[in-house]
Image: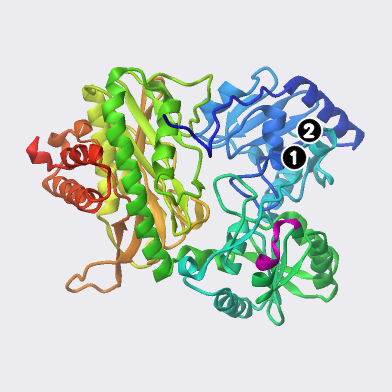
Amino acid sequence: MFEARFQSFEDPQPAATGPRLQALRTELDRRGLTAFILPRADRHQNEYVPPSEERLAWLTGFTGSAGTAIILADRALLFVDGRYTLQARAQVDGSAFAILNSGEITPERWLEANLPQGARLGYDPWLHTVEGAERLSRACANAGATLVPAEPNPVDAIWTDRPAPPLGPVSLHDFRFAGEYASSKLARIVAEIESLRADALVISDPQAIAWTFNIRGADVANAPLPLGFAIVPRQGRPTLYLDGGKLSNAVRHGIEAVADVREPAQFIRDLAALGEAHRTVRLDQATGADALARIITVSGGKVTRGPDPVAMMKAVKNPVEIEGARAAHRRDGTAVANFLAWFEREAPRGQLTEIDAVEAIESFRRDTGLLKDVSFPTIAGSGPNGAIVHYRVTRRSNRTIKPGDLFLIDSGAQYEDGTTDITRTIAVGEPQPEMRDRFTRVLKGHIAIARMIFPDGTTGAQIDPFARQHLWEAGLDFDHGTGHGVGSYLSVHEGPARISKLGTTPLKRGMILSNEPGYYKAGAFGIRIENLVLVVEGPAVSGSEKPLNAFETLTLAPIDRRLIDRALLTPTETEWIDAYHARVAEALAPLVNAESRSWLLAATRPLSAG
């Protein structure tokens, strides 16, 4: 009945870990290196990377989006954060790699404590930022070791069947979706370069390139990104470095209205020329590779680094992008509501699998006729699989959804007018009291964020504890951030703003973020409730001494009423849920299919109605 076109469920091929480790150790010995550090990264520090950049997965078998391996002659280690500890243990040969939680010990701290005196640690300067390379250098110095650039990457020397780099076609992003012409964006960027007293800015983040030049690409899955670099000078025309094989004549002509287009091989030569002219070049501290700084400084130039000015411009959506986001969420909410109604009919029969659910929700989105891609591989975990934060179902792990389960589905879509991301946790049959208690505590945290009124300049770190307070009261917590930024037909995970313990960027009106507290009981169930929110002007408050902001909830889909313990809610929280559900019903009832409408109206009735 349903099928997934943008996702697959094939199990990753087990890595030939032993032979590959041995070949890598031989290569390191040939180069005179004691050890090598390998992050899961590409030249742009992308979250999603093309197959040709999946070195960590090829070597270790670990397919998560964040991790770092350290390989020595007598041992190998894999560092992952709390999101991926269960996944890493399932995918990686524990006899070859020791798996460590990077939240407990970072790779740098481990190196400082364990590198032998006189060791030579190899690193690929294209896969580490300048700051990251500096941290490694300090760790080596404290251990009496030396950090050594290893180019080309030693993994590439032994990866004989490495896929070719991607050649996804580039397209122009129409003004009716972008809301601002590239020429206007470039004028704003040049003004920032002047204020930073730099001669040029290197744009190393493909998201920033796509936004700046009003283009989109197809080089990685789930995000419409063109992989490339750009140099924007304080004076003169910008240059965009893209493989010509990605560009039609019409697209090239569109870009050349505002910038020169050159082949990627010319980028390093032009960067070196800036150095030879003793120019001051600004690099993005988050995505600018250490290799870029080395090219500039060795040639005689000066590097300054800090936040990419494009990142904040991109994060603050303009009125056209905001209206696009609202339209995308109405459309997406319709698809999700149709899915939830279908799931409610089918799941109690005990025949549905996790893959069935993934295929169904993608199909309902495709029925909109406007789906470009899913914004990330759908997370669909029933029972114990729901406790794996970044679980991805495969044919081997596929679980039948059973009565008594909690089912967590986290999914999203890419539309030209907006990017979506939503999580719902659904009871299959009668939930246990513990499930209802934990769900309601998560919901209370979600509501606390959704209802917040906060002074302009407030950061995500200041807001984050409000999502956790009711879990903390019960001695519980969740091991991920509360929210991430979201792009406008770009990456579903967008910086620089986030709601987390590490979120130091002030939240500005026009930013879109997720609101997604959760709770995970290993081996039993997972709970997460996620809506996207838009930072807007807050309500007027008598006597206020600062401008106030608030959140407008964009996501439209019912929250499972069966999992709510009303006794744990305050009247204000009950009022929020009822108002939210009334808004969902009003927006979606005219749009869902006839079979879903009666379910939707029942799912959104007031809590007092039972």
Which segment is the magenta one?
245-251
Residue at horizontal 41 percent and vertical 53 percent from the top = 461
Quadrant assignment for the C terminus: top left
Name the kind of residue labelled 2 in the image.
Pro
Residue 143: assigned label: 1
Residue 117: assigned label: none
Residue at horizontal 50 percent and vertical 73 percent from the top = 180
**Where 352 falls versus 142 (above or below)?**
above
The residue carrying pointer 1 sits among few (fewer than 14), some (14 to 19) or many (20 or more) residues within 10 Å by Cα, namely: some
Name the kind of residue labelled 1 in the image.
Ala
* Name of the residue lying farthest toward the bottom: 235
Residue at horizontal 26 percent and vertical 27 percent from the top = 345
Residue 296 in the image: state x and y as whole percent: 79, 65
Which element type, helix, strand or loop, lies under badge 2?
loop
Residue 297 in the image: state x and y as whole percent: 80, 65
- Residue 502 in sight: no
Q: Who comes first in sequence, dot 2 or dot 1?
A: 2
**Where 208 falls versus 478 (above or below)?**
below
Please name whichever residue, 317 or 60, is drawn nearer the observer in this view of the structure. 317
Q: Looking at the image, do the residues carrying marks 2 and 1 touch, with CB atoms under 8 Å apart?
A: yes
- Residue 493 in sight: yes
